[in-house]
Amino acid sequence: MDTLNEHSDVVRWLRTERASRGLARIELSASLKHQGEVYDDTVLFTALDGALTFGALPEAQREQVQALLRQHHAANTARGNVALSVVCEVSGAARIRMTDDLQRQREEREQARADAHFDARPYGRALAQRVAEILDAGGELSVAIDPHDGVFRALWKPGDGTYVHGLRYAQGDSRPTATFASREEFIRWLAQRSDDVFAREEHPDDPRLWGHGTFNRAFFARKTGRRS
């Protein structure tokens, strides 16, 4: 059994069960998790008045669905957890959807990419100079990446006179990702950057992480007290 369709035994059973019970809707949810070791299924019955009850597949249909999910997982074990949803209503074709972790992650990335809108305008020299003034005065600018573990993205000026962009940790450690030998070098670097550059640079291939714990124009405006 490679796929489910309107003529599959499982779908026919669902349709017959819906009709015989006089239901508005019947839905099968089945999953195979933990490297294909743990199988589970639930059948949700929706009455015409909206009342919900739960049940399970008969043994024969359960074996068919379990075999289908195992087959899907075995074809590519990197797919991870596999899930099947079949919805049958009074009218219309059954809605059948097989998903797995790889597919869900791909869809999440595609949706995140479609939703991503970051300002691509360079910050400009005036903003960069105001940020440099904060660092020159001994200040530090940071945004939280993981507040629970105390990880922050930061701009700071160590005692050696350089300017640094990198990670700071609550316990006091730091990991520079870019170091600038002079004030002018730092200003040129920051002036050429934008929200879009900061948002994408650490995880260019995973839009789900774009903009997480990164600097942006609104942040700099708040910290410097001036819009740009």
Image (cartoon, rainbow, N blue to C red):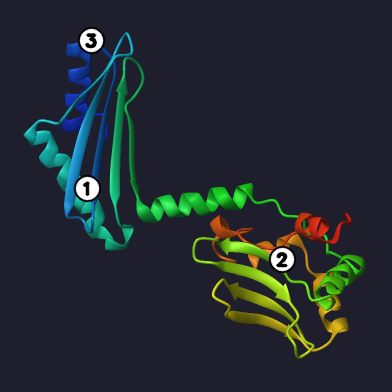
Q: Does residue 7 appear in this view?
A: no
Residue situated in front as seen by the camera: 204 or 74: 204
Q: Which mark is residue 39?
A: none
Image position of 173 (left or right of 142): left
Up/down of 198 relative to 118, above or below: below
Task: Residue 134: give x, y in percent of width and height.
Answer: 83, 71
Tell me the kind of residue under disc 1: Leu
The local secondary structure at tag 3 comes to loop
The numbered mark, 1 or 2, whose residue comes first in the sequence reads: 1
- Residue at horizontal 27%, vertical 34%? 5
Q: Nearer the viewer, mark 1 or mark 2?
A: 2
In this orientation, which residue lies closer to the viewer: 44 or 10?
44
C-alpha span from label 3 to label 1: 29 Å
Q: Which mark is residue 69?
A: 1
Q: Quadrant of residue 44?
A: top left
In the picture of the structure, the residue carrying the numbered disc 3 is: 22
Q: Nearer the viewer, mark 2 or mark 3?
A: 2
Q: Amino acid at mark 2?
A: Val
Tell me which label, 3 or 1, sits earlier in the chain: 3
